Amino acid sequence: VTQFPLDFVPCVSAALRTVRPDTVVLMEWEMWTNFVQAAKRHGATVAVVNGRISDTGLRRGTSARWWLAPALQSVDVFAMQSVEDARRAV
């Protein structure tokens, strides 16, 4: 267990070079875009577990789709809280 790096590319890259994870499990729906993409590039399997997307989160995510899409495409497993949350993740 370690502190999560700031989501800036140099910090993320240094953390991933040090830790070299095989799997990254994100609890709930914290989407750290640079970290998720870099973890995937480093060969890690990326999973979001216990995910939930509120109405507000869906509106915000839809308006920032251009920014979130690459990170979301890097996630291998979405284990959402409900069928509705899974539909919203897609």
Image (cartoon, rainbow, N blue to C red):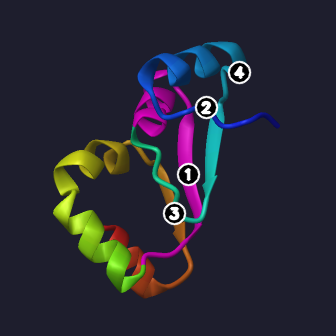
Mark drawn on residue 38: none
> What residue is pinned by disc 1?
47
Q: CA distance from mark 1 to mark 2?
A: 18 Å
The quarter of the displayed image where residue 79 is located: bottom right
1 or 2: tag closer to the N-terminus: 2
> What residue is pinned by disc 4?
19
Q: Amino acid at mark 1?
A: Ala
3 or 2: tag closer to the N-terminus: 2
Residue at position x 82%, y 37% from top?
1
User: In the visual, does 76 lie left or right of 50?
Assistant: left
Q: Is residue 68 above or below residue 15?
A: below
Q: CA distance from mark 2 to mark 4?
A: 11 Å
> What residue is pinned by disc 2?
5
Q: Amino acid at mark 4?
A: Val
3 or 1: tag closer to the N-terminus: 3
Q: Nearer the viewer, mark 4 or mark 1?
A: 4
Q: Amino acid at mark 2?
A: Pro
Residue at position x 31%, y 75% from top?
58
3 or 4: tag closer to the N-terminus: 4
Residue 51 within the magenta-colored segment of the rendering? yes
What quarter of the picture does the C terminus occupy?
A: bottom left
Q: CA distance from mark 3 to mark 4?
A: 22 Å
Residue at position x 52%, y 57% from top?
30
Q: Which residues are magenta?
A: 34-53
- Mark 4 falls on what kind of element? helix
Q: Are marks 1 and 2 in contact (CB under 8 Å)?
A: no
Q: CA distance from mark 4 to mark 1?
A: 17 Å
Residue 20: x %, y % from top left: 66, 20
